[in-house]
C-alpha cells in the first residue's frame, strides 16, 4: 500500500492522559507520515480507499481518533464506524488470543438514540414539574383567600407562607437543574451528531472525517485499530508510553 500525505481537515487536541504519578502517551508503532500542527499522522491508501488516523485524547475513559476516509474508486463504499475494531495486547502479537483483548468502538447512532431518550424523559420531567408548580401556586392562592376570610391567626399564616416559599424555592431549583441537564444533553447530542464519524456511503472522490471513540486500557502496552472498508482491512498499530512525572 502507498502512503497518503495530504489531510484536508483535522481537529487539534491532545493525545496524553495524566494520572497521579504517570503520564500515558499513545504513539504510532510504525513510521509517522507527517506532522500536522504538531500532531502525528499515519495513513494508508490504495486504488480504492485512502485513510488517515490522528491520535486525539479528550475524554476520560476513551481514546479519540480522528479518522479521515476518501473513496478513490468508481464503486460506492459504506463507511461504518461500528466496523472499526480495536485490540489491546501485552506483546504486540495481535494474533495471540491469550494476550489480546478486543474492545468495541462506540456506535454514534446508539449513543444518539440513548441521549434522545434521556432528553425526552428530562423534558417530560420538566413539563410535569412546571405543571405541578402551577397547581401548587393555585392552591396557595385559594388557601390565602380562605385564610383571610376565616381570620387565620397571624403566626399560623406566617408559618404557612414560609412553608409555601420554601416549597417554591425547591421547585425552582428542581426546574433549574432539569433545564441545565436538558441543555447539556442537547450539547452532547450535537457533539455525537456532528463531530463523530457516522455511517456514510461514499461515491467516487467523496470523503468524510470524524472522531472514533475507543475505550482506554492503560494496562496494555500495544494497541491496534483496524478500519474495515471496501472488503479490506487497514491496520494501524500504536504503543502506549508510560512516563513518570518525576522524569519530567
Image (tube, rainbow, N blue to C red):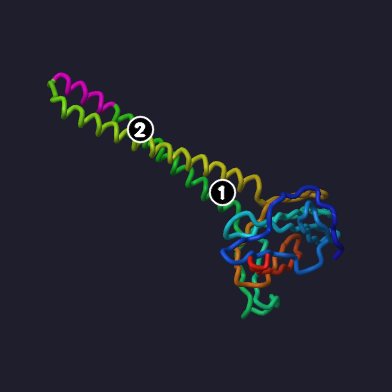
Report which residue position mark 1 lands on: 112
What range is drawn magenta here? Answer: 138-149
> Mark 1 packing: few (<14 Cα in 10 Å), some, or many (20+)?
some
Q: Quadrant of residue 86?
A: bottom right
Q: Quadrant of residue 41?
A: bottom right
Q: Quadrant of the C terminus?
A: bottom right
- In the rendered structure, which disc, 2 or 1, sits on the residue that comes first in sequence? 1
Horizontal side, residue 227 vs residue 172: left or right: right
Q: Is residue 94 above or below residue 6?
A: below
Q: Is residue 139 above or below residue 1?
A: above
Q: Is residue 55 magenta?
A: no
Q: Is residue 147 magenta?
A: yes
Can you give x and y, in whole percent of width and height, for residue 30 in the image? 79, 68
Q: Nearer the viewer, residue 151 or 247?
A: 247
Horizontal side, residue 8 vs residue 217: left or right: right
Task: Name the main secondary structure of what is drawn in magenta.
Answer: helix
Q: Residue at x 15, y 19 (%)?
A: 149
Q: Does the residue at mark 2 contact the one at mark 1 (Cβ under 8 Å)?
A: no
Report which residue position mark 2 lands on: 131
Can you give x and y, in whole percent of width and height, for residue 143 in the image? 21, 26
Whether residue 58 is visible, yes or no, is yes
**What secondary structure is found at the residue carrying circle 1?**
helix
Q: Is residue 180 above or below residue 207?
A: above
Amino acid at each position: 500500500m502507498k502512503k497518503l500525505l495530504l489531510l484536508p481537515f483535522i481537529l487539534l487536541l491532545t493525545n496524553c492522559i495524566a494520572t497521579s504519578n504517570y503520564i500515558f502517551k499513545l504513539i504510532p508503532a510504525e513510521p509517522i507520515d507527517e506532522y500536522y500542527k504538531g500532531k502525528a499522522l499515519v495513513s494508508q491508501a490504495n486504488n480504492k480507499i485512502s485513510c488517515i488516523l490522528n491520535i486525539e485524547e479528550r475524554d476520560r475513559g476513551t481514546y479519540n481518533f480522528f479518522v479521515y476516509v476518501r473513496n478513490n474508486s468508481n464503486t460506492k463504499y459504506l463507511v461504518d464506524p461500528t466496523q472499526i475494531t480495536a485490540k489491546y495486547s501485552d506483546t504486540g502479537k495481535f494474533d495471540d488470543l491469550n494476550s489480546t483483548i478486543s474492545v468495541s468502538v462506540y456506535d454514534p447512532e446508539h449513543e444518539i438514540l440513548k441521549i434522545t431518550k434521556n432528553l425526552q424523559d428530562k423534558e417530560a420531567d420538566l413539563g410535569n414539574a412546571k405543571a405541578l408548580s402551577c397547581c401548587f401556586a393555585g392552591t396557595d392562592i385559594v388557601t390565602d383567600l380562605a385564610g383571610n376570610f376565616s381570620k387565620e391567626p397571624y403566626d399560623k399564616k406566617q408559618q404557612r407562607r414560609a412553608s409555601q416559599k420554601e416549597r417554591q424555592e425547591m421547585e425552582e431549583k428542581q426546574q433549574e437543574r432539569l433545564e441545565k441537564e436538558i441543555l447539556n444533553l442537547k450539547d452532547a447530542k450535537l457533539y455525537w451528531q456532528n463531530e463523530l464519524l457516522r455511517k456514510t456511503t461514499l461515491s467516487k472522490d467523496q470523503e468524510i472525517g470524524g472522531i472514533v471513540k475507543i475505550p482506554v486500557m492503560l494496562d496494555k502496552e500495544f494497541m491496534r485499530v483496524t478500519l474495515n472498508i471496501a472488503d479490506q482491512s487497514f491496520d494501524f498499530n500504536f504503543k502506549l508510553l508510560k512516563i513518570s512525572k518525576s522524569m519530567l
